[in-house]
Amino acid sequence: MAEEHRPPESFRLRLRRYDPESGEAPYWDEHTVELEGHRSVLEGILQAKARFDGSIGIRCSCRAAICGSCGVRINGEPGLACHTHLDHARSSSSGGEGVIEVEPMGNMPVLKDLIVDMDAVHWKKIHRVTPWLINRQPVPEREYVVERESMVDVTQTMACIQCGACVSDCLSMEVDPGFIGPAALSKAYRFVGDPRDAQQRERLKDLAADPLGIYDCTHCFKCVQACPKDVNPMGQIMRLRRIAGTDQGIDDPHNGRRHEEAFTTLVRDYGLNHEAELLARSYGGNSWFGKFHPAAARELLSSVSIIVKAVMRRKVDPRIALLGHRIPPKDLQSVRTIYERVESRPRRNELNLYISGAEEEGDSQEAHAQAPAPAAAQHPAGGAQGSVQQ
Ligand code: SF4
Ligand code: SF4
Ligand code: FES
């Protein structure tokens, strides 16, 4: 069927302009472009550049959501300019004005207008995780033969186009720019999950020991929402944690593994988090020793001013914080049933939910890639888990 002809419409673009070398502050620059609504925000910017101001800075290459170079923020949300329709962007504009606001990505320094310095942040972090395969020895004369499922498992991370949208929105990175971050940690999983790699354990030990590594993610889900390729970076980080902590028993010097376990057991025992016990369990498991661990006491003392502030601002109810939240016994039983069901499984089942579809007979080598469903949390430890359906 022939595509319906759509007449050009007017779209107002408000672009964030900034030239660090000029010494002037950033400012907004508005242009009206004429294009069909299904054309991209990138095409709108390029038309504004061609018709009104050739000095507008925007980076792009493929214009087909493949190269990852046109990452920007559109109406405050990270995304690819070439992969966002003008009419969709207009309908998501804030303030009811119908103006499409385009800004450079966050967490990276601006080079000019909408172009950020990917080398200074994104690529530096990618290099941090040794982003190449370290061959198992001896290298076979011909190809390595690996189980098909193991390669399916890393396919989701291989879909990354290095656009930096997840980095732009990462809340941990905003607070702590040294955090290795969602894109680089997803890349790390790509090799940790690859059976041909010889240094899985060394990689995991390194990422667990780094205070800005796998335990520095706060599960905010922003990277999951930001990613235009459904790589699910947070899910990859959680999988790195489970392989490091649960499977390989790697303890980190910053107590990240125990802290995570503390949350898991608290929810099992109380149905909700119990703030007063969190620190003790993080240091000593469920034992009395943990409650009197000197490191726990030190951390508690260092947090006293924050706790007092939270109580004064009524963000924390001291009674609930000390005694714990109470949920009705039948709800608590439902929570425990989930734990029992998951923990009684003979093995953890967490292949990525990226590849699905029916496998045709005699076509065992071909996997059919489709857009993934959002990863479902099926394990008390949280994160992306599920099964590959073929
Ligand atoms: S889930 Fe973790 S890695 Fe992803 S944006 Fe939030 S803090 Fe960053
Ligand atoms: S994980 Fe997704 S958002 Fe992050 S760099 Fe890769 S493609 Fe972009
Ligand atoms: S120009 Fe390549 S992803 Fe947008």
Image (cartoon, rainbow, N blue to C red):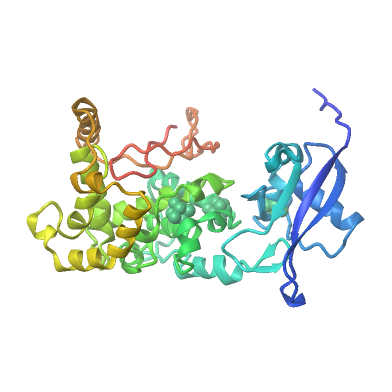
**Image quarter for residue 85?**
top right
Q: Quadrant of the C terminus?
A: top left
Q: Is residue 93 visible?
A: no
Classify residue 12 by image quadrant: top right
Residue 82 in the image: state x and y as whole percent: 72, 48
Residue 137 screen position, x and y as percent: 35, 66
Query: Is residue 316 visible to us here?
Result: yes
Furthest residue toward right:
51
**Quick check: 316 above or below 307?**
above
Who is closer to the viewer here, 108 or 198?
108
Percent coordinates x, y for residue 318 in the rendering? 25, 49
Q: Residue at x 41, y 44 (%)?
A: 148
Where does the image place residue 341, in percent across and percent down from the top left? 22, 31
Q: Is residue 25 above or below residue 323?
A: below
Work out which residue is located at the far top of the displayed protein and give it.
Answer: 1
The residue that appears at 47% across and 37% down in the rendered structure is 374
Kindly give the residue lying farthest to the left in the view shown: 288
In which quadrant of the rendered image does the N terminus lie? top right
Q: Image quarter for residue 285?
A: bottom left
Q: Is residue 340 left or right of residue 142?
A: left
> Residue at (73%, 60%) from the top-left corner?
59
- In this rendering, position of residue 106 left or right of residue 238: right
Q: How many marks?
A: 0
Give the residue at x 14% y 58%: 284
Residue placed furthest toward the front:
312
Given residues 260 and 20, the one toward you in this image is: 20
